[in-house]
Image (cartoon, rainbow, N blue to C red):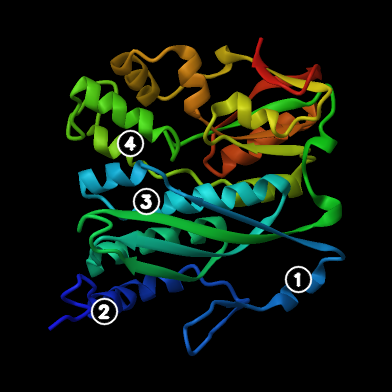
Amino acid sequence: MSTYEAAGVDIEAGERAVELMKDKVARSRRPEVVDDASGFAGLFDASALLKYQRPLLATSTDGVGTKVMIAQQYGKHDTIGIDLVGMVLDDLVVCGAEPLFMTDYVACGKVVPERIAEIVGGVAEGCRLAGAALVGGETAEHPGAMGPDEYDLAGAGTGVVEASAMLGPDRVAAGDVVLAMASSGVHSNGYSLVRHVLRESNLSLDAVLPELGRPLGEELLEPTRIYSLHCLELARAVEVHAYAHITGGGIESNLARSLPPGLDALLDRSSWTPPAIFGVLSAYGKIAQRDMDRTFNLGVGMAAVLPAEAADAAIGLLAGRGLDAWVMGEIAPGTGQARYR
């Protein structure tokens, strides 16, 4: 006799996973969240937007990429959801939008309730760190399409910004400075190259390299730093013209997206020292500097473009929140590029 369970789908395990994650999800709740007894949809009270004169809704969707394969190999699943939130909600804040809520999607070969609860618990913790609510999601079991220990993770977020307060290239001016905000490590981009280096160098995730002082797996699974609340507070405290979220493509290509056609960002590579993990990857993988530049964040997770006279106050504010920041460059006439001088 054929049954859904015989086909590889365990409905009871899915229900158990939902029960295990409930408390963690509740920690991300905002007062605007409205309960839906059916559980088919996540509800958010839109009357909260009435304080805006012209509210613009912002939305973003993304995944964690092949970093999930490192999590699966190393057997650590409780922070990969934080990575997802960083990838999704920190894109929203670039235009000045406040993240409001998020939904997630987990596809897996087999529902292991405890593992799913760890993954979604990380998403909920990331939402809490970003000031957003996790209002819903889906866990899908795909036996035959994915191995029993395999999973993938994606999500979508929604935010809001006052139209007149929207940040972007049109605000950037010659004489502005580029303020770098430190990353927590590799974040969630470049892991296909990371895994290639591991394979080619026969590096084990359990290896404790002297440059790192902890297992390589722990270093590579350091969760993505979430900048949303820092960026929102900074924009309230000082004049900010633009942000750039440093993700796939590295510093230059992402910063260029926040520049107008007639201005360049001239960057000073000597203004900071990238975290040790990037030196490890470069050395073991024999990766050229140009490939490092266009693949990894190299220690800069978010950049702000602001007037030079606001830089000291901005650095001080972020330092008070435990976030290292420094001036890494300046804005000058050009052709809309970010480049090292």
- Quadrant position of residue 94: top right
Q: Secondary structure at mark 2?
A: helix
Residue at image coords 36%, 68%: 139
> Is residue 298 something one can see in this rendering?
no
Q: Nearer the viewer, residue 285 or 79?
A: 285
Q: Which residue is mark 3?
A: 80
Mark 2 neighbour density, 10 Å: few (under 14) some (14–19) many (20 or more): few
Mark 1 neighbour density, 10 Å: few (under 14) some (14–19) many (20 or more): some
- Kindly check if marks 3 and 4 are in contact, taking CB atoms under 8 A apart as contact: no
Give the amino acid at mark 2. Ile
Which mark is first along the chain, 2 or 1? 2
Residue at image coords 79%, 26%: 176
Which mark is first along the chain, 2 or 4? 2
In this figure, what is the number of numbered marks? 4
| Relative horizontal placement of residue 4, taking residue 270 as reference (left or right) | left
> Is residue 17 something one can see in this rendering?
yes
Which mark is first along the chain, 4 or 1? 1
Q: Secondary structure at mark 4?
A: helix
- Kindly check if marks 4 and 2 are in contact, taking CB atoms under 8 A apart as contact: no
- Quadrant position of residue 280: top left
What is the x, y in percent for residue 105?
A: 43, 63
Which mark is first along the chain, 2 or 3? 2
Which mark is first along the chain, 1 or 3? 1
Numbered badge on residue 220? 4
Q: Nearer the viewer, residue 252 or 125?
A: 252
Q: CA distance from mark 1 to mark 2?
A: 38 Å
Q: CA distance from mark 4 to mark 2?
A: 33 Å
What is the x, y in percent for residue 318?
A: 61, 40
Q: State whether residue 313 is above or below residue 134.
A: above
Q: Which residue is mark 1?
A: 49
What is the x, y in percent for residue 178?
A: 69, 27
Numbered badge on residue 11? 2
